[in-house]
Amino acid sequence: MHRFFRIVLYTALALGANATVADTASLDALRLGDMKKLNLAEQAKPVPDTVFTSADGGEISLSQYKGKYVLVNFWATWCAPCRAEMPSLSALQAEFGGDAFEVVTIATGRNPQPALEKFFAEAGVTNLPLHRDPKQQLARQMAVLGLPVSVLLNPEGQEIGRLIGDADWHSEEARALISALLGRS
């Protein structure tokens, strides 16, 4: 019995020493519905500091979002599943966006600015950034092979989860997962 308590104690200490492992371990049980497609990393992975084009035409990198959880969504105007999921990403940002969490959308490949604006207008999206990765440099370095792809980053700017394909990001399951990640009940 004494050995059992030592094992529990050492496991708790190990998880406490690595908050990302603890975070993703607790999230695993919440992977229901579309969130079953969310692959949680066993260990946080660094992401490249590759520059992409900001909504205002300047340069930006993912490192500028450090300090909060970030859901990075790679998409394109020609992508039908992207069109289907964009309103739910907007709703997720409306509910959770702020100092602790942000949805960051990055159109990858050839996506002319007028087409991006039309896409968002048709989808009723007004609260997400129109960032672009026109040469797909960031997408390639992050192994984005199809669209859409959503990558979950921890406040240290490391990848802790990835969902390939579209999802209802404002479903009860997705909201429960993000709430748990942010320590909300």
Image (cartoon, rainbow, N blue to C red):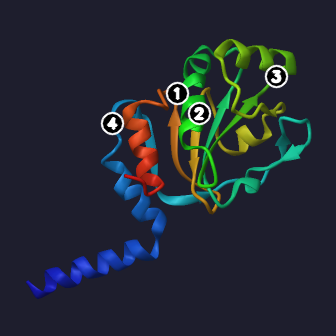
Residue that numbered label 4 is attached to: 32
CA gap, disc 1 and disc 3:
19 Å
- Whether pointer 2 and pointer 1 mark residues with C-beta atoms closer than 8 Å, the reply is yes
Q: Name the residue type under label 1.
A: Gly
Q: Nearer the viewer, mark 1 or mark 4?
A: 4
Q: Name the residue type under label 4.
A: Leu
CA gap, disc 1 and disc 4:
15 Å
Q: Is residue 72 visible?
A: yes
| Count of numbered badges drawn on the protein | 4
Q: Name the residue type under label 3.
A: Arg
Residue that numbered label 2 is attached to: 149
Q: In which quarter of the view is residue 93 placed?
A: top right
- Residue 134 placement (x, y as % from top left): 83, 30
Q: Residue, x 43% and y 63% (percent of image)?
A: 21
* Mark toward the start of the polypeptide (2 vs 4): 4
Q: Nearer the viewer, residue 82 or 124?
A: 124
* Mark toward the start of the polypeptide (3 vs 4): 4
Secondary structure under tag 2 reads strand
Q: Residue, x 83% and y 41% (percent of image)?
A: 52
Identify the residue at the far bottom of this view. 2
* Mark toward the start of the polypeptide (1 vs 3): 3
- Residue 122 placement (x, y as % from top left): 69, 12
Q: Name the residue type under label 2.
A: Val
Q: Residue, x 60% and y 13% (percent of image)?
A: 80
Secondary structure under tag 3 reads loop
Residue that numbered label 1 is attached to: 165
CA gap, disc 2 and disc 4:
18 Å
Residue 104 in the image: above or below residue 29: above
CA gap, disc 3 and disc 4:
34 Å
Residue that numbered label 3 is attached to: 110
Graded by Cα atoms within 10 Å as few (under 14), some (14 to 19) or many (20 or more), the crowding at tag 1 reads some
CA gap, disc 2 and disc 1:
6 Å
